[in-house]
Image (spheres, rainbow, N blue to C red):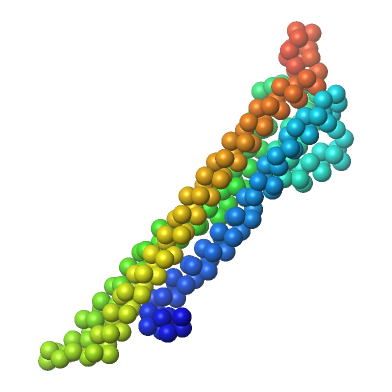
């Protein structure tokens, strides 16, 4: 491996850095986007069961928020209903939407960096190829003679950097697409959970004389 790096020349070092960063991002995202940390399968049903007859205490809501990203989203809805019993459905939906935007930012974290590596690695490999071609042309003496050592080194730089750039870009692009799909599935699950919670939580809202939660309260 060391001999390949030496043959590829100095343009290989930015590619090696990209490979290390890209691998770290992939490992971090695969760990952070696990379903148990985002959408525990039975959490929504447990929350619906616990809140069937009454709203939970503040301690229970805090534990729910620390459980997972879904728990954090559900805790937001519980907190706004507990803090404002006269809440309207529109306000509750807005609270869920705001929490959903924050969840989206959490899920998308580092994905742009991984996509940038996937796009930039071939260009960096092409840069190494250009450097190698320059060395190849530099191996030609004014008299027409060729320096075999410089010629071989230039070819090595050109080929190794091109290959290494593709080796980095292809897996990075595949993982980027895969992780993007995981994020979209998680966001759909969060949206569906919020839709189920809205009518469930509105049962605890104080109803006005008109029969609508939070309506007709202004003097």
Q: Relative to 208, does residue 178 appear above or below in the rendering?
A: below
Which residue is at a point 60% across and 55% down the rendered structure image? 30
Along the horizontal axis of the image, is 158 left or right of 113? left
Q: Quadrant of the C terminus?
A: top right
The spot of residue 207 in percent (x, y) is: 79, 14
Q: How many marks?
A: 0
The spot of residue 130 in percent (x, y) is: 28, 73
Q: Nearer the viewer, residue 96 or 49?
A: 49
Which residue is at a point 48% across and 67% down the rendered structure image? 18
| Residue 131 can be seen in this image | no
Which residue is at a point 25% across and 85% down the rendered structure image? 151
Which of the 4 quarters of the picture holds residue 104? Answer: top right
Residue at the farthest top position: 210
Along the horizontal axis of the image, is 45 left or right of 137? right
Along the horizontal axis of the image, is 101 left or right of 134? right
Q: Relative to 122, does residue 87 appear above or below in the rendering?
A: above
Which of the 4 quarters of the picture holds residue 43? Answer: top right
The spot of residue 19 in percent (x, y) is: 49, 67
Q: Nearer the viewer, residue 217 or 15?
A: 15
Along the horizontal axis of the image, is 55 left or right of 80? right
| Residue 48 can be seen in this image | yes
Which residue is at a point 85% across and 24% down the rendered structure image? 53
Q: Relative to 49, does residue 112 appear above or below in the rendering?
A: below
Which of the 4 quarters of the picture holds residue 204? Answer: top right
């Amino acid at each position: 491996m060391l001999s390949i790096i030496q043959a590829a020349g100095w343009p290989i070092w930015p590619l090696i850095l990209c490979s290390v960063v890209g691998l770290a991002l992939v490992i971090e995202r695969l760990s952070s986007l696990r379903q148990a940390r985002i959408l525990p399968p039975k959490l929504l049903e447990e929350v619906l069961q616990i809140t069937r007859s009454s709203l939970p205490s503040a301690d229970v809501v805090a534990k729910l928020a620390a459980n997972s990203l879904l728990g954090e989203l559900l805790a937001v809805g519980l907190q706004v209903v507990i803090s404002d019993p006269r809440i309207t459905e529109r306000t509750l939906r807005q609270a869920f939407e705001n929490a959903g935007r924050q969840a989206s930012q959490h899920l998308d974290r580092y994905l742009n960096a991984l996509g940038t590596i996937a796009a930039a690695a071939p260009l960096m490999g092409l840069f190494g190829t250009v450097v190698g071609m320059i060395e190849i042309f530099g191996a030609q003496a004014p008299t027409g003679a060729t320096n075999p050592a410089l010629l071989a080194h230039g070819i090595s730089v050109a080929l190794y950097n091109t290959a290494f750039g593709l080796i980095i870009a292809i897996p990075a692009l595949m993982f980027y697409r895969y992780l993007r799909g995981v994020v979209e599935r998680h966001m759909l699950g969060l949206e569906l959970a919020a839709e189920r919670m809205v009518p469930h939580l509105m049962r605890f809202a104080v109803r006005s004389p008109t029969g609508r939660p939070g309506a007709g309260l202004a003097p």
